[in-house]
Image (tube, grey):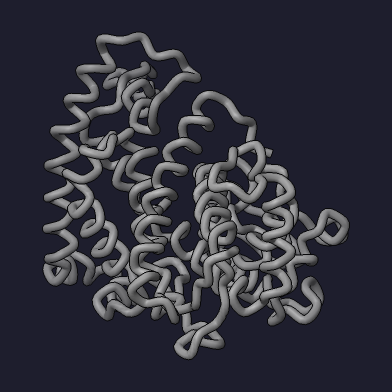
Amino acid sequence: MLRCTGNVKRVSDKMFTASKSMMASIENDRQIHPDEMNITKYIDSYVLEGVARVVLNLDDEGFKLCREEIKNYLFFSNWSASAENEAAGLARLFPTLTPILKLADKEHKKSCEELVAILRKYISSTMNGQNNNTIASDDHASLLSYLLSANVLDRDIDGSLERRDLTLDEIISHVLSLLSEMYSTTTAAIQFILYELAINPDVQENLYKEMCHYCGTGDNFTLTECDRMEYFDMILYEAIRLHPIAPGLSRVCTRDCKIRNVTFKEGMVVRVMTSPLYRDENIYKNPDEFDPERFSKKNRETRHQYSFLPFGQGPRMCPGQKLAIIEVKYAVISIIKSYVLSTSKNTEIPLKEALRPSLTPANGVTISLTPRT
């Protein structure tokens, strides 16, 4: 459950604002192309706006001023690590070539420099403003506010530990990381859910009924109402099981050990590949089928807790889990409450996928949207 604290409420308000912009764009273009539309660019814009508002606390004017720079950075950052990028592939196979291969990564470098210049000016201004105000630990307007208030342990020359503020460059690095990680995975998750709803009309209808039950039929809804939708959660988890956005996760072994006769050495990087795990018929019967009932409370209790790892587990699990779920729910609820999704003549079945670097629809998701009456 997402406890609706002041900070979570502010996040949900920002995502609701972004969802309104998305819906206006969808309806405007649907009037021009009523038969079908590729939903991807609208989802991309929605997540981009929402993440920018949540991370940097940008208002409408501030977002307009840096939207293109953030968009370019995210595009080239993802392409730089994409499996379709031959230079990135060579860097993975031959790490020693990375410095040379970076020379070919000109667009990524340029977009990064342009965004960093904007962030340096914006964060410096925000830092000065925050230093003149007392910020309570649970009353931050954005993730940037947390970073500006953070203290980290640092070792001095004499070996003693002391706390210090993050430097401007460290804050910028964290902001860039937050923007990248939240953007690519969330856009992919929303697209995969909409695709599965379009090709599974019975599931879509059951979800719509649940939405009406908890949120009514109007345009407005709250985070508390979203959080009550158990069937929505089942659809979300089944979509990212069938389309694992993060096909694997890595952990570093902290001590020598042996598990089921397999020896692990301290310092060894252990990578758990979730893709084959989610297609294991011993865990998920008929794994190629889309079946949200796999994630009913009753069925979840029959499986090992590590049989599904969409956000990882333990102290190193994804710190953006709650934000990602809020983003996904606000987008999908807004769309399903307004339109019936269905396949069109250009809908890819099965959907072609690509690693960029998260798993994502290779050519977007083309579907038909019919207004609900």
Q: Nearer the viewer, residue 175 or 129?
A: 129
Seen in the picture, residue 216 relative to 290 is either above or below; the reply is: above
Residue 72 in percent (x, y) is at 21, 59
Residue 365 in percent (x, y) is at 45, 76
Tell me what residue is drawn at x 13 percent, y 33 percent.
121
Residue 222 in percent (x, y) is at 59, 38
Q: Nearer the viewer, residue 249 or 230?
A: 230
Residue 277: name its quadrant.
bottom right
Tell me what residue is drawn at x 50 percent, y 38 percent.
12
Seen in the picture, residue 115 relative to 355 is either above or below; the reply is: above
The reply, left or right, for residue 142 in relation to residue 222 is left
The reply, left or right, for residue 83 in relation to residue 121 is right
Q: Residue furthest front?
A: 373
Seen in the picture, residue 75 relative to 346 is either above or below; the reply is: above
Tell me what residue is drawn at x 41 percent, y 61 percent.
43
Residue 38 in percent (x, y) is at 40, 75
Q: Residue furthest bottom?
A: 345
* Quarter the N terminus occupies: top right
The reply, left or right, for residue 335 in relation to residue 264 is left
